[in-house]
Amino acid sequence: MKILVTGNLGYIGPELAKIIKAYKSDWHLTGLDIGIFAGCLTSCGLIGDTFYDTQHYVDVRDITDEHLNGIDIVVSLAAVSNDPIGKEFEEATFSINYKANINLANLCEQNGVKKFILASSCSLYGSGGSKPRTEADQTMPLTAYANSKITCEDQLKALFSDKNMELIFLRFATACGISDRLRLDLVLNDFVASAVAFKKITILSDGSPWRPLIDVQDMCRAIVWAIEFDLRNNINSNTISINIGSNEWNYSVKELAELVCVQCPGTILEINNDAPEDKRSYKVDFTLYKSLAGSFYPSKEINTTIQELVAMTSCLHLQCYSDIRSTDYIRLNKVRKLIESSKLTKSLRRL
């Protein structure tokens, strides 16, 4: 089995390589990444990059037939990764998250790739209310990032529903947890870093918005499930959009902060009850994934994830709130610095 992972030098990619190689050591892994965040390392051990058998330093927008030679499965992780970057670089977000994936899927189909797995997002449910959203519910993307994901899903279904290649769209819950390239622009990771650095968590909203979460290791296990899952024999179709997470991990923002406070005694929780309403609020129903995933269904406990984050962020020596806000572990900071130093264009291309 030969697998190409785009965007492998980010938050998920190193952990994915470890989990894939532990599952099937003879699967050949090729990574393809522009390398913007390659230096944002937080691990002192053997990083997951070393588990890739081949590495291409290429912008996903410039992928060619040569990169797909002999590849059986493509896992598309390459993306502008969150709402703040998407808002500041909207054109690049659609170029990378949408247009590049359409081009990549076309090349995959032309080169005989058997399966295309897209890392999508539950954020496309937007303002979902208190009823958990299923895959059949209407989407309501509120940001450029979320809109790029649902637009990509819809277009890929329109183009490839009658083709031989299988397509699986993994609508991931909000990521959290430790990685060789930790991100602190994720809600739970941010709360833990704040608690560790200066014993205070400040919620900029009233804390009521809902978020589904998933540990990065369970995200990677879901990708292994997608690699193994036989679409046609199980659902009689070559495409599926599926929510990836666990029903037990739907939390309000306030509940998440309170969980962190329990694990970090002495942490003060501040809530802005006068803040404008945060319309990004959604619970998600993961029943379909639970019925299909078997042992791949998320198994980590959230307190375990918090404890692991406490251990990792304690080693980063973040001393205050300004340290957290300025660090490259917040991806928008890294992008801005590369642009200011003329190493990256505003279209997020390398110079």
Image: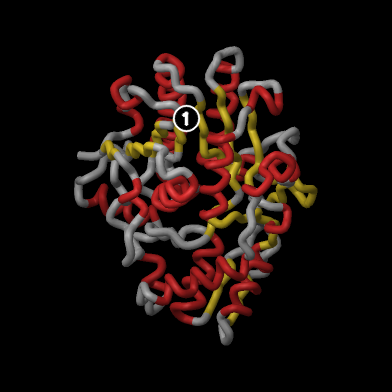
Q: Quadrant of the N terminus?
A: top left
Numbered label tally: 1
Q: Quadrant of the C terminus?
A: top left
In the displayed structure, would residue 162 be above or below residue 23? above
Residue 311, how many percent across, how many down?
46, 74
Asked whether the viewer can see residue 335, the reply is no
Residue 263 relative to residue 25: left or right: right
Residue 336, how many percent across, how many down?
31, 52
Q: Residue at x 46, y 45 (%)?
A: 20
Q: Residue at x 62, y 65 (%)?
A: 302
Instruction: Residue under label 1, please give it.
Output: 98
What colouring does the structure picture have?
secondary structure
Q: Quadrant of residue 62?
A: top left
In the displayed structure, would residue 43 be above or below residue 231? below
Asked whether the viewer can see residue 330, the reply is yes
Residue 116 relative to residue 211: left or right: left
Q: Quadrant of residue 149?
A: top right
The furthest residue to the bottom: 266
Q: Residue at x 44, y 26 (%)?
A: 72
Residue 69, how many percent across, how many down?
33, 22
Q: Nearer the viewer, residue 241 or 277?
A: 241
Q: Residue at x 51, y 58 (%)?
A: 186
Task: Tell me if mark 1 has few (under 14), some (14-19) or many (20+) residues whose alpha carbon lies within 10 angstroms of its own.
Answer: many
Amino acid type shown at disc 1: Tyr
In the displayed structure, would residue 31 be above or below residue 39? above
Looking at the rendered structure, the secondary structure element under dot 1 is helix
Residue 281, how many percent across, how many down?
68, 52
The furthest residue to the right: 131
Q: Nearer the viewer, residue 147 or 176?
A: 176
